[in-house]
Image (cartoon, rainbow, N blue to C red):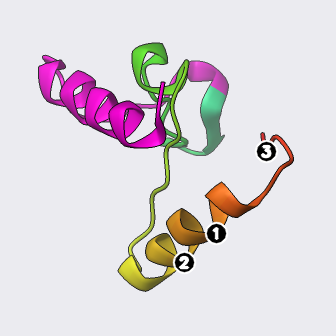
Amino acid sequence: MAMDKKIVKQAYDIAKLRDRSIKGTKETIYFDNASIGVLPEIITENNIVVASSNNGAVQNIVNELPLTKEQID
């Protein structure tokens, strides 16, 4: 599937979610009640997720990722 189709599918999958909040689990608690959110598998199974409060940083990543030939975890 082409990258642009994956992005559209990912956006569609996110929009379909009943609960659009990202919550942690017991396993992701790292300090008192602070927890790392876990994305639903439907969002991460075949897609790329880039998140940041800095739109410029996200744009740089989106522009550079297609240039790499290595798989990134």
Q: Name the residue under label 2.
A: 60
On the image, the x and y values in percent for residue 34 come to 51, 47
On the image, the x and y values in percent for residue 71 come to 82, 40
On screen, residue 62 above or below 15: below
Q: Is residue 50 left or right of residue 30?
A: left
Q: In this view, does 22 lie to the left or right of 8?
A: right
User: Is label 2 in contact with label 1 (beta carbons under 8 Å)?
Assistant: yes
Q: Comparing marks 3 and 1, which lies closer to the viewer?
A: 1
Q: Residue at x 49, y 54 (%)?
A: 50
Q: Is residue 72 left or right of residue 33?
A: right
Q: Distance between the residues labelled 3 and 1?
A: 12 Å
| Pointer 3 or 2: first along the chain | 2
Q: Which residue is drawn at 42% across and 25% down?
A: 43
Q: Mark 1 points at which residue?
A: 64
On the image, the x and y values in percent for residue 3 come to 47, 40
Specify the amino acid type for callout 2: Asn
On screen, residue 55 above or below 6: below
Neighbor class of circle 3 (other Cα within 10 Å; few <14, some 14-19, many 20+) is few
The answer to if 2 sits in the magenta stretch is yes
Specify the amino acid type for callout 1: Glu
Specify the amino acid type for callout 3: Ile
* Magenta-tinted stretch: 1-27
On screen, residue 58 above or below 70: below
- Callout 3: helix, strand or loop? loop
Q: Which residue lies furthest to the right in this view?
A: 70
Q: Name the residue under label 3.
A: 72
Q: Image quadrant of residue 19?
A: top left
- Callout 2: helix, strand or loop? helix
The answer to if 57 sits in the magenta stretch is no
